[in-house]
Each structure stands twice: as structure tokens, then as C-alpha cells.
Image (spheres, rainbow, N blue to C red):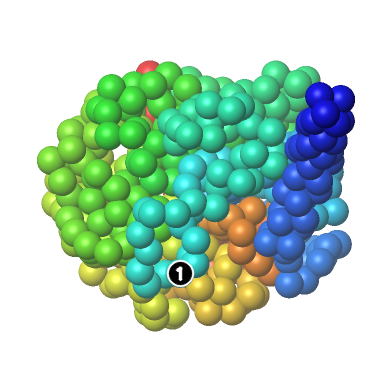
Amino acid sequence: MKKKYKAYLLIIVGLFLIIYYAALPEYATYMDANMNKTTNPPPYSVNDRAQKLHDSLIVADLHADFLLWNRDLLERHDYGLVDLPRMQEGNLSLQAFTIVSKVPNGLNIHKNTADSDQITLLALAEHWPFKSLTSLKERALYQAQKLHDYAKRSNGQFVIIKTKDDLTSFVAARHNGKKLTAGFLGIEGAQVLEGDLANVKVMYDAGFRMMSATHFFDTELGGSAHGVSLGGLTDFGRAVFEDMQQRGMLIDIAHASPALIDDILAFTSTPIVSSHTGVRGTCDNQRNLSDDHLRGVARTGGVIGIGFWDVAVCEFSPEAIVKAIKYTADLVGVDHVALGSDFDGAVKSPFDASGMAQITEELLKQGFSEADIRKIMGENTLRVLGEILPD
């Protein structure tokens, strides 16, 4: 009987190992390939004038969830939306790499609770450290370390921006003709703090320079636009944002409830960003910003990152993206508009990172000047980072 039980145990262990090392990674790749798609596959082409202008830009994007997935940033892939080769091809010069730590089941833009989580299985499938299976803080730290590892292995092609000096050096290199690509780290939802103010420093030390209060559910900082309470800024949230401002971290209002946005705008002493959003003036739904909130972000000196997916702009096209950009620029001024793709955020996009020139082409078609296009495509984001980042 003992031999029989040993045989059963070996079979069970063997099955577990097969599932863990073979089946689960395949599941993760399947999810990535099916959730991060383009509606128009590459290659992409634009007219000569647009391509020439685009190649001269520093293009900055405020939101991509690449670090959630099990792709190597340094290798080109035929699925997903971001990697270094495609960023280089599309002249996507500076990318905010934003981390996702928890996503509820039945995800929607109307009402979600924090009672469930889809990321645990994905983390297990991608062989994240076991401590990250039960700690949202550890999930953030692991994803940050992944980006640092890519930078180390890139042979100087990719750098991480953490300080004003880093940003200045990057911009100087680009202006001197070096096709250097850069990233900076952001956090989608302050649940990674696990209710402890001291973890702001932990995130800062790990390289994070932007954080939003909420993602798809309410947190200790305040209400999500897709949560239950729709509440405003809590005392803990105020303390977190005060700490962030002192350290040189961007406050991101993406996914925040209207009441929380109002409170943040009334409270802040630094420029605010909405890293990835649409605007209700062109695509009216609960996910997108009202005119009053667009004006409020502009009053802080901040920027609104226009998203590329259908919930943000109501279509999958460069034309829809530029329609939202133009609406925002007309309302609050061209100095306050930026890009916020949400690449690899489990959403479809009209193109991947190699197709960014399509936005430049459409901006030209819509009559934007080359100076204004430079601002929209990157200079506005560079300005805000230059004001916020620590010395």
C-alpha cells in the first residue's frame, strides 16, 4: 500500500510540475495574445511629410501595462503592443511603464468591489515570486525590478528616468541624434501601499515616479470612478499625496471618482496628470473626463493623456484619437494635451507601438502646426516631468 501511495504522490507531483512549468505559461501567453491586440496589424505607413516630422519628435506616452505580461521588452514580438524594437520603429521615445496589481472579476466601468482578483492566477502562471501572490506591494516591486533588469541588459539602448538630471541627459542625447529610448515607472492604484504611508518611500526607492489613487475599485485613498462609494479624498489619501509631492512623484487622477478628482484638484500644489483617459465631449461615458475636470487639470499646469482604445475615444482609429486631442486642445489649450495609449492594458488598439506616426499624420491633416504637434506628442509630458521629478 505504501508503494501505491508513493506512486500516486509522484503522479500528483508530476502533474503539478507539468501544469506549473508548461501549461500555466502557455495560458499566460494565450491571455496576452488575445487581450492585447491591434484592430489594424502592422506594418504601418504614413505620408513623407508626416514621417519626416515624426522622426524628428520626442514622442512620450503616459501609460502602458507591459510589465504585467511575460514578454521580454528587448525582443520583438508578433503579439502584444509594446516592446523596444517596436518602440524604436515607431519613435516612441519615452514610455510610462505602469504596473497593475489587482483587477476584480467581472471588470466594468460602472461598479466593482475589491472582493476578487484576476491577477493572482496570472502571477502564478508567469512564475512571479511566491510572496507576490499574497502581497500587492510585492507585485509592484517585482514589476519595477523587471524594468530595471531590462535596462541593464539593453546595452545602453534603454534607460529609466528617475530624476531631473536623468531627463535632461535623455533629452540632450535625443537632440544630439542618439536614438535612446527611455521609460519611467508608474502605479495604477495605490492599493499597493497596503494602507501603510511608509510604503510611499518604498515605492519611490523602487523607482516609481507616478501613482494614481485608484484603479477599478475603491482604495484607502478614495473612491474609484468604477467603485462602490464614489467617495472623495480620505485623510490617508491626503497624507499620501503630500508625501508624493514632497518626493517628486506625479499624482495621476486616472480612474478616480468625480468627487476624488475635485478634492485632488483643490488640494494639489503641483501639476496633475490623467495618464490615460478619454473626454466626455467626444466619447461620453463614466470612464472619461468632464470639461470641468479638463479645465481643472489645466489650471494645475498638468496634462491629459488621451487614450487609444474604444472606451476612451469611442472608435479604434487615429482619427478618433485626434478628435479627442483637438477637443481638449480647443477647450484648455494645446499645452495640456498628451498621449496615454493604455498599450498592453488588456485592450485593443488601432495600432501597436510601431504605428505612432499615424497620430502625427492625422494631427497634420487636422491643421495642427508642427510646433503644436511637438508639444502634444511629447514636449508637454517632458515639461511636466521636468517640473515634478526630484533633483
Residue at image location 64% in from the left, 75% down from the top: 316
Quarter of the figure with the N terminus: top right
Q: Amino acid at mark 1?
A: Asn
* Above-or-below relation of 221 to 105: above
Residue 296 visible to the viewer: no
Residue at image location 49% in from the left, 61% down from the top: 105
Measuring from the top left, give residue 233's x and y in whole percent. 17, 49
Count of labels in the image:
1
The furthest residue to the front: 1
Measuring from the top left, give residue 118's x and y in whole percent. 54, 52
* Above-or-below relation of 174 to 217: above
Measuring from the top left, give residue 360's x and y in whole percent. 64, 62
Q: Residues within 10 Å of mark 1 (few under 14, many from 20)?
A: few
Element at badge 1? Answer: loop
- Which residue does the numbered mark 1 point to in the structure image? 108
* Of residues 325 and 24, the one drawn nearer to the viewer in this rendering: 24
Quarter of the figure with the C terminus: top left
Residue 30 visible to the viewer: yes
Measuring from the top left, give residue 214's x and y in whole percent. 34, 50
In this rendering, would 104 be left or right of 12? left
* Above-or-below relation of 143 to 380: above
Q: Quadrant of residue 30?
A: bottom right
